[in-house]
Image: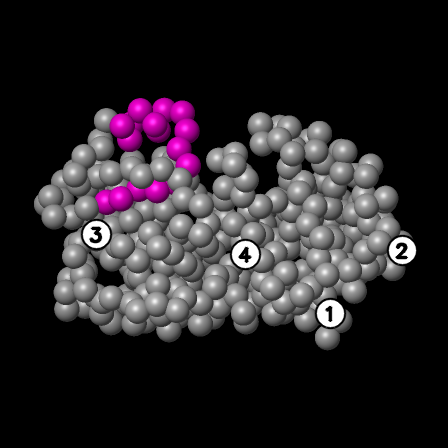
Amino acid sequence: MKMLFIGNIPTNDLRSIGGASSLNYNLLSFLKRNDAKVTFYELRKNWKPKWQIIDYIVFLFKFPFISLKYEVISMHATRDFRISIGPFIVLYSKLFNKRTVCHFYGGFFHKKFEGYPKIFQWWLRHTIFKSDLVLMETKEQVNYFNELFKKDTITWFPNARKKQDLQVENEYSKKFVFISRVTKQKGVKLMIEIFKELPLNYTLAIYGPIEGKMKNFIAKVQGKQISYHGSLAPEEIIPTLIKYDLLLLPTLHPNEGYPGIIIEALSCGKPVISSNLISISEIIENGKEGILTKQGDKSQLMEAIQFFNTDNYKSFSKNALEKFELFDEEIVFSKLLKFYLND
Protein backbone atom coordinates (compact mmCIF):
# COMPACT_ATOMS: atom_id res chain seq x y z
CA MET A 1 0.00 0.00 0.00
CA LYS A 2 1.47 3.35 -1.08
CA MET A 3 1.25 6.37 1.22
CA LEU A 4 1.58 10.11 0.55
CA PHE A 5 2.97 11.91 3.60
CA ILE A 6 2.14 15.65 3.44
CA GLY A 7 3.96 18.05 5.76
CA ASN A 8 7.27 19.73 6.50
CA ILE A 9 10.62 18.74 7.96
CA PRO A 10 13.56 20.93 9.07
CA THR A 11 15.56 22.49 6.24
CA ASN A 12 18.51 24.88 6.07
CA ASP A 13 16.08 27.72 6.73
CA LEU A 14 16.02 28.22 10.51
CA ARG A 15 12.33 29.16 10.33
CA SER A 16 11.55 25.57 9.38
CA ILE A 17 12.88 24.22 12.67
CA GLY A 18 10.15 23.47 15.19
CA GLY A 19 8.39 20.77 17.15
CA ALA A 20 6.09 19.65 14.34
CA SER A 21 8.75 19.55 11.64
CA SER A 22 11.18 17.68 13.92
CA LEU A 23 8.52 15.11 14.77
CA ASN A 24 7.79 14.65 11.07
CA TYR A 25 11.49 14.08 10.41
CA ASN A 26 11.64 11.34 13.05
CA LEU A 27 8.35 9.78 11.94
CA LEU A 28 9.43 9.65 8.29
CA SER A 29 12.78 8.12 9.25
CA PHE A 30 11.00 5.43 11.27
CA LEU A 31 8.60 4.59 8.43
CA LYS A 32 11.43 4.30 5.92
CA ARG A 33 13.46 2.09 8.28
CA ASN A 34 10.45 -0.20 8.47
CA ASP A 35 10.10 -0.40 4.68
CA ALA A 36 6.84 1.53 4.47
CA LYS A 37 6.07 2.61 0.91
CA VAL A 38 5.86 6.27 1.83
CA THR A 39 6.49 9.33 -0.34
CA PHE A 40 7.11 12.70 1.30
CA TYR A 41 5.58 15.88 -0.14
CA GLU A 42 7.10 19.05 1.30
CA LEU A 43 4.39 21.70 1.65
CA ARG A 44 6.45 24.78 2.37
CA LYS A 45 8.71 25.83 -0.49
CA ASN A 46 9.38 29.22 1.04
CA TRP A 47 9.45 30.05 4.74
CA LYS A 48 8.83 33.78 4.42
CA PRO A 49 5.80 34.93 6.45
CA LYS A 50 2.48 34.40 4.62
CA TRP A 51 4.14 32.66 1.66
CA GLN A 52 2.54 29.39 2.76
CA ILE A 53 -0.70 30.72 1.23
CA ILE A 54 0.86 30.39 -2.23
CA ASP A 55 2.28 26.96 -1.39
CA TYR A 56 -1.11 25.73 -0.19
CA ILE A 57 -2.99 26.98 -3.24
CA VAL A 58 -0.44 25.40 -5.57
CA PHE A 59 -0.71 22.12 -3.69
CA LEU A 60 -4.50 22.15 -3.85
CA PHE A 61 -4.39 22.30 -7.64
CA LYS A 62 -1.61 19.70 -7.89
CA PHE A 63 -3.14 17.25 -5.42
CA PRO A 64 -5.61 15.48 -7.78
CA PHE A 65 -2.67 14.52 -10.01
CA ILE A 66 -0.16 13.78 -7.23
CA SER A 67 -2.61 11.55 -5.32
CA LEU A 68 -3.45 9.23 -8.22
CA LYS A 69 -0.92 6.54 -7.31
CA TYR A 70 -1.48 6.52 -3.54
CA GLU A 71 -3.98 4.54 -1.43
CA VAL A 72 -3.37 6.48 1.80
CA ILE A 73 -3.22 10.27 2.17
CA SER A 74 -1.53 11.23 5.43
CA MET A 75 -1.64 14.91 6.47
CA HIS A 76 1.00 16.05 8.95
CA ALA A 77 0.76 19.81 8.56
CA THR A 78 0.11 22.72 10.88
CA ARG A 79 -3.27 24.11 11.93
CA ASP A 80 -3.57 26.70 9.15
CA PHE A 81 -3.34 23.93 6.53
CA ARG A 82 -5.65 21.56 8.40
CA ILE A 83 -8.53 24.01 8.62
CA SER A 84 -8.12 25.62 5.19
CA ILE A 85 -6.91 23.08 2.63
CA GLY A 86 -7.21 19.92 4.75
CA PRO A 87 -11.01 19.57 4.50
CA PHE A 88 -10.87 19.61 0.70
CA ILE A 89 -8.09 17.00 0.71
CA VAL A 90 -10.21 14.70 2.87
CA LEU A 91 -13.33 15.17 0.72
CA TYR A 92 -11.46 14.50 -2.52
CA SER A 93 -9.69 11.47 -1.02
CA LYS A 94 -12.98 10.00 0.20
CA LEU A 95 -14.48 10.48 -3.27
CA PHE A 96 -11.82 8.16 -4.66
CA ASN A 97 -11.87 5.68 -1.74
CA LYS A 98 -8.51 6.69 -0.36
CA ARG A 99 -7.82 6.25 3.34
CA THR A 100 -6.93 9.43 5.20
CA VAL A 101 -4.94 10.41 8.27
CA CYS A 102 -5.08 13.82 9.96
CA HIS A 103 -2.38 14.61 12.50
CA PHE A 104 -2.94 17.37 15.09
CA TYR A 105 0.12 18.89 16.77
CA GLY A 106 0.16 20.87 19.98
CA GLY A 107 -2.27 20.85 22.86
CA PHE A 108 -4.69 23.66 22.12
CA PHE A 109 -6.83 22.80 19.08
CA HIS A 110 -9.87 21.84 21.17
CA LYS A 111 -9.88 25.36 22.64
CA LYS A 112 -9.65 26.88 19.17
CA PHE A 113 -12.47 24.60 18.01
CA GLU A 114 -14.75 25.82 20.80
CA GLY A 115 -14.32 29.39 19.57
CA TYR A 116 -15.16 28.68 15.93
CA PRO A 117 -18.64 29.55 14.56
CA LYS A 118 -21.07 26.62 14.65
CA ILE A 119 -21.15 26.34 10.87
CA PHE A 120 -17.34 26.06 10.75
CA GLN A 121 -17.39 23.45 13.53
CA TRP A 122 -19.91 21.47 11.43
CA TRP A 123 -17.64 21.78 8.38
CA LEU A 124 -14.59 20.46 10.23
CA ARG A 125 -16.61 17.71 11.90
CA HIS A 126 -17.73 16.43 8.49
CA THR A 127 -14.35 16.78 6.78
CA ILE A 128 -11.08 16.45 8.69
CA PHE A 129 -12.75 14.62 11.58
CA LYS A 130 -14.13 12.13 9.06
CA SER A 131 -10.57 10.98 8.41
CA ASP A 132 -10.05 7.25 8.92
CA LEU A 133 -7.51 8.03 11.63
CA VAL A 134 -7.19 11.25 13.64
CA LEU A 135 -3.98 11.63 15.66
CA MET A 136 -4.03 13.92 18.71
CA GLU A 137 -0.92 14.85 20.64
CA THR A 138 -2.46 15.20 24.10
CA LYS A 139 -4.84 13.06 26.14
CA GLU A 140 -6.89 16.14 27.01
CA GLN A 141 -7.74 16.66 23.33
CA VAL A 142 -8.48 12.97 22.73
CA ASN A 143 -10.93 12.96 25.63
CA TYR A 144 -12.56 16.19 24.47
CA PHE A 145 -13.19 15.13 20.86
CA ASN A 146 -14.11 11.55 21.72
CA GLU A 147 -16.77 12.86 24.07
CA LEU A 148 -17.97 15.41 21.52
CA PHE A 149 -18.06 13.18 18.43
CA LYS A 150 -18.48 9.71 19.99
CA LYS A 151 -15.91 8.31 17.54
CA ASP A 152 -13.27 5.62 17.96
CA THR A 153 -11.01 6.92 15.19
CA ILE A 154 -9.43 9.62 17.38
CA THR A 155 -6.33 8.29 19.09
CA TRP A 156 -3.51 9.48 21.34
CA PHE A 157 -0.34 9.99 19.32
CA PRO A 158 2.17 11.77 21.55
CA ASN A 159 5.41 13.33 20.49
CA ALA A 160 7.98 10.53 20.52
CA ARG A 161 11.70 9.99 20.17
CA LYS A 162 14.16 7.15 19.63
CA LYS A 163 15.27 5.21 22.70
CA GLN A 164 18.87 5.98 23.53
CA ASP A 165 21.55 3.35 24.05
CA LEU A 166 23.81 5.25 26.41
CA GLN A 167 25.25 5.17 29.87
CA VAL A 168 23.40 7.76 31.93
CA GLU A 169 25.54 9.74 34.37
CA ASN A 170 23.70 10.77 37.51
CA GLU A 171 26.21 13.26 38.84
CA TYR A 172 24.83 16.73 39.48
CA SER A 173 26.96 19.78 38.69
CA LYS A 174 24.43 22.64 38.33
CA LYS A 175 24.67 22.73 34.52
CA PHE A 176 21.37 23.74 32.92
CA VAL A 177 20.46 23.77 29.24
CA PHE A 178 17.72 25.40 27.15
CA ILE A 179 17.05 23.99 23.66
CA SER A 180 14.22 25.61 21.72
CA ARG A 181 13.44 28.75 19.77
CA VAL A 182 15.23 31.61 21.52
CA THR A 183 12.29 33.94 22.09
CA LYS A 184 10.76 35.86 24.97
CA GLN A 185 7.66 33.65 24.68
CA LYS A 186 9.76 30.58 25.47
CA GLY A 187 10.83 32.18 28.76
CA VAL A 188 14.40 33.04 27.73
CA LYS A 189 14.50 36.51 29.30
CA LEU A 190 13.00 35.14 32.50
CA MET A 191 15.69 32.45 32.73
CA ILE A 192 18.46 34.96 32.15
CA GLU A 193 17.12 37.30 34.83
CA ILE A 194 17.27 34.42 37.30
CA PHE A 195 20.74 33.21 36.39
CA LYS A 196 22.10 36.73 36.83
CA GLU A 197 21.06 36.43 40.49
CA LEU A 198 22.40 32.90 41.07
CA PRO A 199 25.91 32.00 42.22
CA LEU A 200 28.42 31.69 39.38
CA ASN A 201 28.61 27.88 39.68
CA TYR A 202 25.09 27.71 38.18
CA THR A 203 25.48 27.78 34.40
CA LEU A 204 22.95 28.10 31.57
CA ALA A 205 23.69 27.06 27.99
CA ILE A 206 21.22 28.20 25.32
CA TYR A 207 20.70 26.51 21.94
CA GLY A 208 18.21 27.25 19.20
CA PRO A 209 17.22 29.54 16.33
CA ILE A 210 17.37 33.23 17.21
CA GLU A 211 16.06 36.26 15.37
CA GLY A 212 15.61 40.01 15.61
CA LYS A 213 16.08 41.92 18.85
CA MET A 214 16.78 38.75 20.81
CA LYS A 215 20.17 38.48 19.05
CA ASN A 216 21.30 41.76 20.57
CA PHE A 217 19.90 40.86 23.97
CA ILE A 218 21.74 37.52 24.06
CA ALA A 219 24.97 39.12 22.85
CA LYS A 220 24.90 41.52 25.82
CA VAL A 221 24.47 38.81 28.48
CA GLN A 222 26.91 36.21 27.12
CA GLY A 223 29.65 35.20 29.50
CA LYS A 224 30.95 32.28 31.56
CA GLN A 225 27.62 31.77 33.35
CA ILE A 226 25.23 32.31 30.40
CA SER A 227 26.24 31.21 26.90
CA TYR A 228 24.58 30.92 23.49
CA HIS A 229 25.75 28.16 21.13
CA GLY A 230 23.61 28.52 18.01
CA SER A 231 21.12 26.09 16.45
CA LEU A 232 21.31 22.31 16.54
CA ALA A 233 20.65 19.81 13.77
CA PRO A 234 18.30 16.99 14.86
CA GLU A 235 21.18 14.52 15.21
CA GLU A 236 23.07 16.94 17.49
CA ILE A 237 20.40 17.26 20.16
CA ILE A 238 21.05 14.09 22.18
CA PRO A 239 24.88 14.50 22.24
CA THR A 240 24.26 18.05 23.49
CA LEU A 241 21.72 17.12 26.16
CA ILE A 242 23.98 14.55 27.79
CA LYS A 243 26.55 17.27 28.56
CA TYR A 244 24.16 18.93 31.01
CA ASP A 245 22.19 18.05 34.14
CA LEU A 246 18.72 19.52 33.61
CA LEU A 247 16.59 20.87 30.80
CA LEU A 248 14.96 24.26 31.35
CA LEU A 249 11.84 25.13 29.32
CA PRO A 250 9.87 27.81 31.22
CA THR A 251 7.59 28.49 28.25
CA LEU A 252 5.10 31.36 28.36
CA HIS A 253 3.30 30.01 25.29
CA PRO A 254 -0.33 29.07 26.08
CA ASN A 255 -0.64 26.52 23.26
CA GLU A 256 2.16 24.07 24.02
CA GLY A 257 1.59 20.42 23.21
CA TYR A 258 4.26 17.88 24.12
CA PRO A 259 7.56 19.66 23.44
CA GLY A 260 9.85 17.22 21.68
CA ILE A 261 12.86 18.49 23.60
CA ILE A 262 11.24 17.35 26.86
CA ILE A 263 10.80 13.85 25.42
CA GLU A 264 14.44 13.86 24.32
CA ALA A 265 15.55 14.96 27.79
CA LEU A 266 13.63 12.06 29.35
CA SER A 267 15.32 9.64 26.93
CA CYS A 268 18.68 10.74 28.36
CA GLY A 269 17.56 10.58 31.97
CA LYS A 270 17.58 14.37 32.32
CA PRO A 271 15.04 15.92 34.71
CA VAL A 272 13.04 18.88 33.42
CA ILE A 273 11.94 22.23 34.81
CA SER A 274 9.04 23.62 32.81
CA SER A 275 5.69 25.42 33.00
CA ASN A 276 2.69 23.88 34.70
CA LEU A 277 0.43 23.49 31.66
CA ILE A 278 -2.05 20.62 31.32
CA SER A 279 -0.22 19.26 28.28
CA ILE A 280 3.22 19.36 29.91
CA SER A 281 1.85 17.87 33.14
CA GLU A 282 0.83 14.83 31.05
CA ILE A 283 4.57 14.26 30.44
CA ILE A 284 6.19 15.52 33.63
CA GLU A 285 4.73 14.64 37.00
CA ASN A 286 5.62 17.48 39.32
CA GLY A 287 8.15 16.32 41.88
CA LYS A 288 8.93 13.08 40.07
CA GLU A 289 10.59 13.59 36.66
CA GLY A 290 11.03 17.30 37.21
CA ILE A 291 9.47 20.47 38.60
CA LEU A 292 6.57 22.41 37.06
CA THR A 293 6.13 26.08 37.88
CA LYS A 294 3.46 28.69 37.26
CA GLN A 295 4.00 30.41 33.91
CA GLY A 296 6.08 33.55 34.28
CA ASP A 297 6.52 33.17 38.05
CA LYS A 298 10.12 34.18 38.70
CA SER A 299 10.24 33.14 42.35
CA GLN A 300 8.83 29.65 41.62
CA LEU A 301 11.31 29.14 38.81
CA MET A 302 14.20 30.31 40.97
CA GLU A 303 13.10 27.91 43.72
CA ALA A 304 12.85 25.01 41.26
CA ILE A 305 16.36 25.62 39.92
CA GLN A 306 17.79 25.72 43.44
CA PHE A 307 15.78 22.67 44.55
CA PHE A 308 18.08 20.12 42.91
CA ASN A 309 21.16 18.80 44.66
CA THR A 310 23.48 15.79 44.62
CA ASP A 311 21.12 13.85 46.92
CA ASN A 312 17.81 14.17 45.05
CA TYR A 313 19.11 14.37 41.47
CA LYS A 314 19.65 10.64 40.95
CA SER A 315 16.05 9.68 41.74
CA PHE A 316 14.71 12.34 39.34
CA SER A 317 17.06 11.06 36.64
CA LYS A 318 15.90 7.47 37.16
CA ASN A 319 12.25 8.53 37.02
CA ALA A 320 12.88 10.44 33.79
CA LEU A 321 14.24 7.32 32.08
CA GLU A 322 11.26 5.27 33.24
CA LYS A 323 8.72 7.86 32.03
CA PHE A 324 10.32 7.88 28.58
CA GLU A 325 8.98 4.39 27.89
CA LEU A 326 5.58 6.00 27.13
CA PHE A 327 7.17 8.08 24.38
CA ASP A 328 9.43 5.52 22.73
CA GLU A 329 8.99 6.03 18.98
CA GLU A 330 9.12 2.28 18.31
CA ILE A 331 5.88 1.96 20.29
CA VAL A 332 4.17 5.23 19.36
CA PHE A 333 4.99 5.28 15.64
CA SER A 334 4.00 1.64 15.23
CA LYS A 335 0.36 2.74 15.63
CA LEU A 336 0.59 4.65 12.37
CA LEU A 337 2.62 1.96 10.63
CA LYS A 338 -0.06 -0.64 11.44
CA PHE A 339 -2.73 1.63 10.00
CA TYR A 340 -0.70 2.20 6.85
CA LEU A 341 -0.30 -1.56 6.43
CA ASN A 342 -4.01 -2.05 7.15
CA ASP A 343 -3.12 -4.31 10.06
Q: Secondary structure at mark 4?
A: helix
Q: Tell me what residue is drawn at x 16 percent, y 57 percent.
A: 173
Q: Position of residue 191 (x, y in %)?
A: 26, 42
Disc 2 to disc 4: CB gap under 8 Å: no
Describe residue 310's horizontal placement relative to residue 342 as left or right. left
Question: Mark 1 is on which residue type?
Answer: Leu
Question: Mark 4 is on which residue type?
Answer: Asn
Describe residue 69's horizontal placement relative to residue 307 as left or right. right
User: Gap between marks 2 and 3, in whole Å?
Assistant: 55 Å
Mark 2 or mark 4, which has the lower sequence index?
Answer: 4
Based on the picture, tell me whether residue 217 belongs to the magenta stretch.
yes
Mark 4 or mark 3, which has the lower sequence index?
Answer: 4
Q: Nearer the viewer, residue 57 or 288?
A: 57
Looking at the rendered image, the disc whose residue lies closer to the viewer, 2 or 4, is 4
Which residue matches tag 3?
175
Q: Tell me what residue is drawn at x 19 percent, y 68 percent.
A: 312
User: Gap between marks 2 and 4, in whole Å?
Assistant: 30 Å
Classed neighbour count for the residue bearing mark 1: other residues with Cα under 10 Å, few (<14), some (14–19), many (≥20)? few
Looking at the rendered image, the disc whose residue lies closer to the viewer, 2 or 1, is 1
Disc 3 to disc 1: CB gap under 8 Å: no
Q: Position of residue 2 (x, y in %)?
A: 77, 60
Mark 2 or mark 3, which has the lower sequence index?
Answer: 2
Q: What quarter of the picture does the N terminus occupy?
A: bottom right
Describe residue 184's horizontal placement relative to residue 9 as left or right. left
Residue 26 badge: 4
Question: Mark 2 is on which residue type?
Answer: Phe
Q: Tell me what residue is drawn at x 48 percent, y 61 percent.
A: 161
Which residue matches tag 1?
341
Q: Quadrant of residue 26?
A: bottom right
Span shown in magenta: 204-219
Q: Tell me what residue is drawn at x 18 percent, y 61 percent.
A: 172
Classed neighbour count for the residue bearing mark 3: other residues with Cα under 10 Å, few (<14), some (14–19), many (≥20)? some
